[in-house]
Amino acid sequence: MQVKKNIILTNINIALLFIYFFTLLFFLFTNDSSGMAFNRNKIATFNEGWTITHNNIIEENAVLPQNYDIAPGTTYSIERTINYEDFIYPAIRIRSSMMDVYAYIDDELIYSFDVSKNHTVLEEPLPASWQLIDIPVAKSIGKTLKITFSSPTPYFSGLLNSILIGRGEALILDIIQDNYLSIIISIFIISLSIFMLTTIFWTGKLGVTKHIVYLSTFGIAAGLWIISESTLLQIFVPNRFLIASISYVLNLVAPLIVALFFRDVVLNGYQKLMTVIGSSFFYLLILEFILQITGKVLFIESTIYSIILIGIAAIIVIICLIDEGFKKGNQKAKHYLFIFLILFVFASIIMGLFILGVYQDLGKYLAIGVLGFYLLVMGDTIASINTLIETKNKSLIYKQLAYEDYLTKGWNRTAFEQDIDKLIKNGTVFRLILLDLNHLKQINDTYGHIEGDYAIIQSYKAIKESVGSNGKSYRISGDEFACIIYDTDDKLLEEYRNKINQILLETSKNKPYNIILALGTKIYDCNENFTDFYREVDIEMYKHKKILKSKEVKLT
């Protein structure tokens, strides 16, 4: 029951997170924010009036962005004269896509960023990062600002991105504002994933631990990927290696997790194949990392192999889902085919754009697909947990009925025999007490079965209350009861006997009959045959029963 309460609380909390998230999105997209974006009036586009020099060609009054066919490692530049009319703010922001960036004022170097510079003996990956260049406008009027670029990779050599001019803090805040949707989605997915991981503490016994772990780790990986692709990571974690490598690493980690998820949760007949696919992602990740740090192949250059593997793996997964879902009747496979196709479509768009060289806003496109996939899988996970809880509760009810006496609601003979077997196997010394309710037939015949049932129930209650936590009580037949006592002290036995008699004396006060229990007991020392031992205790109980009948005294 505690597990069920925790899951209900989990469902409520998740529902509240969803409500909060979508309410936040509603206000973000519908609210009038005019006058609230305090940095927008401190920045401006700075894309016109540049002189571009490339491949021995000079272009006057050119407009950014541009993309030229320039050999890797070749320098190209943009320049313009500094004046008060154009340079209204003291800093410009440029997106350097794996490029060396150098800024000069009349050939005097004022800023440099060397993308290929290594801080260790290993070859570091090339980062795509923001460059914030401070311009000393006041003392540079009439002089020429020149910015040179050079990229060692053909993917970005010749690229000139848009430029903004403004105050430093405003230019940074502008990055955040342009990516607020990606921020919200990534924070939501990561937060929900971490929260789901905490539910393992009360859902572990339901057999969904792998389900939750895979979903949560995928969510964390996807959330971090969205942040890195939205060009925000540099603001929060200005670590060159992390900025340059995390996207490429997560490109393979996320599908690895998905492959393991399908192996252990969805596809029953293709577990070995999913293991092979997951292993392929893992070994490709290791290989790409080794090639990068040894300077053989850059991450950006080996990404094409990641894309090919992801594409092949996705097609294989779809075929497996179709086969299991429609040919073998795996309903879960049918369900996940639809869910996976959503992620597949968005991932295909991203891969297509990457191959075509369209790198801008990739994170935003995939963020939407990942969010849809994640929410659908999350919904299925919650539904699965709820189904398992219902099944477990039914199982507990059936188990309880198997070991519960229908009348007293205490333990029955089946439970007694099971506990005895455990004690004997463990070599535990214990005291066995057998009890019999006197005159039950007369009570039934004279006063009716309701009174007979009352006498049975009160007898069991008296036994259970007397023994307390020192043992366990059972109703083993119509008028017979048993007690297993772990403390074999004779003094305690007398206390139990006296307490039972006192309770039954009080219970019988207003009844026209006595509720009397005959009692036999002996200590089991693990060396004797239990059947013989039980017979001896039973004989002791019947001896006491005869003594009580001979006295026929009403305990009042």
Image: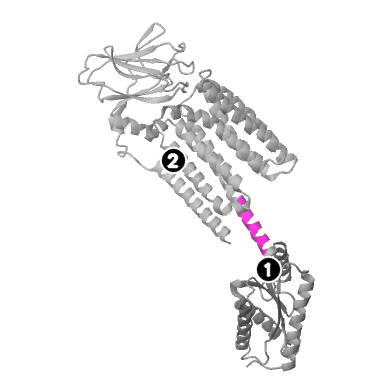
The amino acid on which the numbered mark 2 sits, given as a three-letter code, is Ile
* Element carrying mark 1: loop
Label 2 to label 1, Cα distance in Å?
63 Å
Task: Using the image as rendered, state which of residue 321 and residue 194 is in the foreground.
Answer: 194
User: Mark 2 vs mark 1: which is more N-terminal?
Assistant: 2
Res 429 label: 1
In the image, what residue occupies the spot 46% across and 11% down?
A: 71
Decide whether residue 220 is among the magenta residues: no
Asked if 190 appears above or below 470 in the picture, the reply is above
* Residue 436 falls left or right of residue 313: right
Name the residue tied to disc 2. Answer: 184
The answer to if 392 sits in the magenta stretch is yes
- The segment highlighted magenta reads 384-397
Residue 106's spot in the image, x, y percent? Answer: 26, 12
Q: Amino acid at mark 1?
A: Val
Relative to 522, 124 lies left or right: left
- 228 relative to 534, above or below: above
Residue 453 at least partly seen: yes
